[in-house]
Image (cartoon, coloured by chain):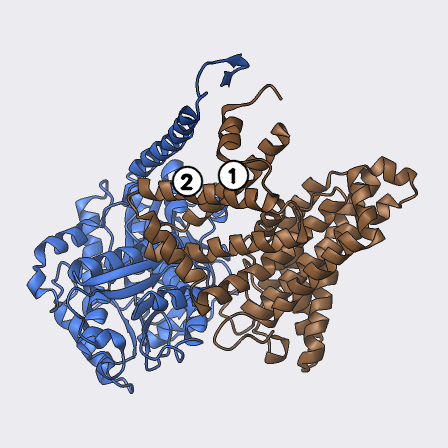
Amino acid sequence: MEYRSTLQQAYGFAFNLTAPPVVRSLFAVAMAFVVFGLLLLAIGRDPVEAYTKMFQGTLGSKLGLSEVGVKMIPFVLTGLAAAIPARVGLINVGGEGQLYIGAWAATGVVLYLGVGQIWLMLPLMAAAGFLGGAAWGAIAVFLRNWRGVNEVITTLLSNYVAILLINVFVFGLWKNPDGFGYPYTADFGTEAILPALAGTRLHLGLVLPVIAVVASYLVLTRTTWGYNMRAVGGNPEAARRRGIPVGTYLVIAMMVGGGIAGLAGMSEVAGIQHHLRPGISNNLGFLGFLASWLAGHNPTGIVAASFLLAVIIVGGDVLQFSGNLPSAAMFILIGLVLFFVLGFRRLERATA
Amino acid sequence: MYIFGYRVPLFHSPLSRIAGVAALLATMVLLACGADATSTPRPPAATVAQVATEVAPDTAMAFEPTVDDLAGGSPEAFAAAFEKAIAGSQFRPTSEFAAAAQPLAEGEKLKIGFIFVGSQRDLGYNQAAAEGSQYLEQVFPDVEVIRSENIPETADVQAVMEQMIRDGATIIFPTSFGYSGPTKDIIEKHPDVMFMHMGDSESFENYGAFFGNIWQLEYAAGQMAGNATETGKLGFIAAFPIPQTLLNVNAFHLGARSVRPDVETTFVLTGSWCDPAKQATAVQTMIDAGVDVVTQHQDCTKTIVEAAERAGIFVTGYHQDASSAAPNAWLTGAVWNWGPVYAELVNEIRNGTYKSSVMFVGLEEGWVKLAPFGSFVSDEEKQAVLDTVEALRNGSLQPFAGPITDQDGTVRIAEGVVPTDPELQSISYLLEGITGRTN
């Protein structure tokens, strides 16, 4: 190609385009860390010390590693919630809302179907969480199939509806009568709590992303369904002519995605919070969406991207007090990572 | 390179390409420097700065606050509050277990962790606590404070505390009420670390609790509001109907009625300690209903204070002096004086004399103070409010002496009865003349 911008030239110069995608992504992430380090220098902090503390606090201790795992659980799940619909060409920005509805449904099971048996209770809660998230996602895809409403808009806006719906319950019917008016449900009994690894907060919910990643990897790469999904996502019209039921694939992909986000909600209330309250998610759904885009909607890539985001989020807490940085600093770092990874991917397309 | 499609003979050699990338990065850094220059942290309050210059390094270990530090409170009452709490405690002194009570090695610093539920610059609860932690560093040169802000009142706070302990912190102040449950879950795991919770009503060996009793100053602020209002309608914006909030709004209302008996107060709940959007809506609704003095029990106070300034009504503050945000609207306010309190607690822990207890004292001991008056407040009104504060301090004024009637007309405190402080702290109703709900 004749026309090349300076940035493309710099990138081509700095980095060999024939390198495998993993190495290219790592390079982009490294660039983000370099620029963030320069920003630290600019405000008079020592970047080497800050990064050392950040990685010691996350990867260098049992505590930090377990916290990274705790954060990865919802990131991977909500990442898959964006990636699976993306295979059929749907953009699901609704992971946050689906997570909340999943948490809501799991809490409903605890409040109304309390059975006192942990081996029955947890699967019931997980099933309810999955169905809740799936139903919430289904609204958007049905609106798309029947009325042609853009699912980006409906999934995004339904997040806020979901959050307000949770408020209706925790401020009203489900509020703990002994809670001084605080909008929390009563704490779950031990039969509804995912057991945690001794001394950490890393809980049994870890099996959920493992199962979800393996299953979605196998389905997407080893089955006809996965092949058909890619066909639908690539060219819906061609897929339709070949007899693939495109509408059904859209509905199922979105519902499975929503359901997986719902599982994240279930694992958050049952594993971390132990009751339902507003603000349980703290943007987990949106960060999972980021992870999916960072990974190019690839299930194994999502695990890597979630790991990176979890390290930054957990490390951000460490940076706050050891580097004396404001809490917004970690979002700047996440923003830089996104900028470089997606920016370089764009350049690759332009130069290819 | 190309600019708008025109070929410009620049950046052709590898060296000039590196220069180009470097220039790009340098620009970003320079921009960041500029951004930082405009957002340097605000200096601590004037009183704090004065103390810093007065304290000589060699006397730093012996902490004795002055009357000025205590905003008029008596140093004797301040010291007595700590002695009484220690004497009444069933726990071991910190010298027997707390790592913080061990002498420091040469050049070593005592690390103290502070965790805030909101921003340290919220002109409210968290800023008051953050400035208290700065005071601590100024009084004790060998103390290093590490801070974490915007930590939700969920199990997430445990992760932050664990990281702080790993970083060497031996005293931790979880400054928000909602941290109590998650904190108590981990105190047994860290028997050498001293946790100082703000607001809990129980204590354990390495978990002390303390909070300030501030309702008297809400009464004084209410008196100022009663002087200022023309419509006779006051607004109180709160988060949850917990007893402390109900006591504040009742005291505020009584204070206003002491100078203007026909005052009506509207009590609105936002369901959040800091939701600026809901605060703005609440203020606007109140203004539309004719309210001309607003106050609040919220963590972040900026939105409401600024909204009052814009609307041309009056505001009284809470938690922190926010007069700078509303020069034409600010009357006065009831604010915390955490600096000396933190300093004395840390001093006791280090000396090994502290024993876990639940401390709850206020005006007389100087744990709370009246914020500065607005510049437009007349001298007579100032003096009247200061006289009220003095009467509350020495106990000659008892606003909750019966008869006290609730909003439904039921007499809650009979004639001739003066409720005790614990009774007031468990108040569950709103007084006559207040519109709002308690659930």
Which of the numbered marks, if any, corresponds to residue A340? 1
Q: Position of residue A184 (x, y in %)?
A: 55, 66
Distance CA(mark 1)–CA(mark 2) = 10 Å
Tell me residue B169's x, y (percent).
30, 67
For disc 2, the chain is A
Q: Quadrant of residue A277?
A: bottom right
B332 and B169: which is toward the camera? B169
- Would residue B384 be found to the left or right of residue A69 on screen? left
Q: In the rendered view, tell whether residue B146 sits above or below residue B315.
A: below
**Amino acid found under the numbered disc labelled 2:** Val
Chain letter of disc 1 in the image: A
Q: Which chain is blue?
A: B
Residue B285 in view, yes or no: no
Q: Are marks 1 and 2 in contact (CB under 8 Å)?
A: yes
Q: Is residue A4 visible?
A: yes
The disc placed on residue A35 is 2
Residue type at the position of mark 1:
Phe
Q: Which chain is brown?
A: A
* Residue B98 position (above or below residue B303): below
Between B90 and B271, the one lying in front of the other is: B90
